Amino acid sequence: MAKDTPPRWDRRMHQRLSRGEAAALGELYDRYASLVHGLAHRVLDDDDAADRVTREVFGHVWENPDTYDPKQGSIRSWVAKVTQRLAVQRLRRTEAEAYEARGEGSAEELEQKISRVSVAARADYIVRSMPTPLWDALELAYFQRRDYRQTAADLGVTEDEARRRLRLGLQLLSTANTQAGSGSSPPDNGRSL
């Protein structure tokens, strides 16, 4: 399959959404609602606001299936990008109103806050999408304080493989800061690894 060809499921889902199949939206919702809500909550830190953004995201997907470009990544990445954009828009509105009401804060402080929550939301997305072998290696090394030799032994892999998994996992996580503010979409589930 060519590099820019989306997976079969994505291609079929896009066709179904474009035809206006309500069942397709329901299937997409079942698959990605928890991702969307989690990302929105990470940005907004408010369940009710995250619920509203979740509805807005799936409303946008239903009304604008043509905004999905398979060359830009998977449907999952597109949905995550729409989520982040709508959540950040909502955060900007609510925080600007709050700053105005209190008569404090500046546009620069607001943008710094938005940048911080965008990086955190992107990191959450990356961790949720990271292949299990990479996550397992990172968890052992960074949360359980294992060195790469202990990580290799715990995972039952060679030391070279443990180092490779740690390096790839860290490379994925490092993209959270560099791409969150640039408006690029989240990685496509790390499956190209």
Image (cartoon, rainbow, N blue to C red):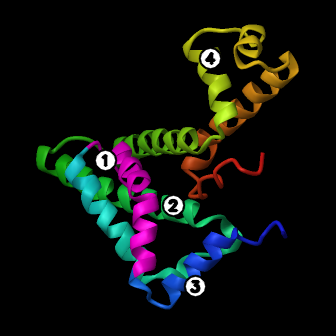
* Nearer-N-terminus badge (2/4): 2
In what element is the residue under mark 2?
Answer: helix
Q: Nearer the viewer, residue 156 or 98?
A: 156
Q: Which residue is mark 4?
A: 140
Residue 144 percent location from the top left of the image = 57, 11
Which-is-in-front pick, marks 2 and 3? 3
Prevailing secondary structure class for the magenta stretch in the rendered image: helix
* Nearer-N-terminus badge (2/3): 3
* Nearer-N-terminus badge (1/4): 1
Q: Could you tell me how far apart the alpha carbons at marks 3 and 1 are, in whole angstroms?
A: 32 Å
Q: Are marks 2 and 3 in contact (CB under 8 Å)?
A: no
- Highlighted magenta segment, given as a residue range: 23-45
Q: Could you tell me how far apart the alpha carbons at marks 1 and 4 are, in whole angstroms?
A: 30 Å
Q: Is residue 105 visible?
A: yes
Q: Which residue is mark 2?
A: 81
* Nearer-N-terminus badge (3/1): 3
- The N terminus is located in which quarter? bottom right
Which-is-in-front pick, marks 3 and 1? 3
Residue at position x 76%, y 72% in the image: 5
Amino acid, disc 2: Lys
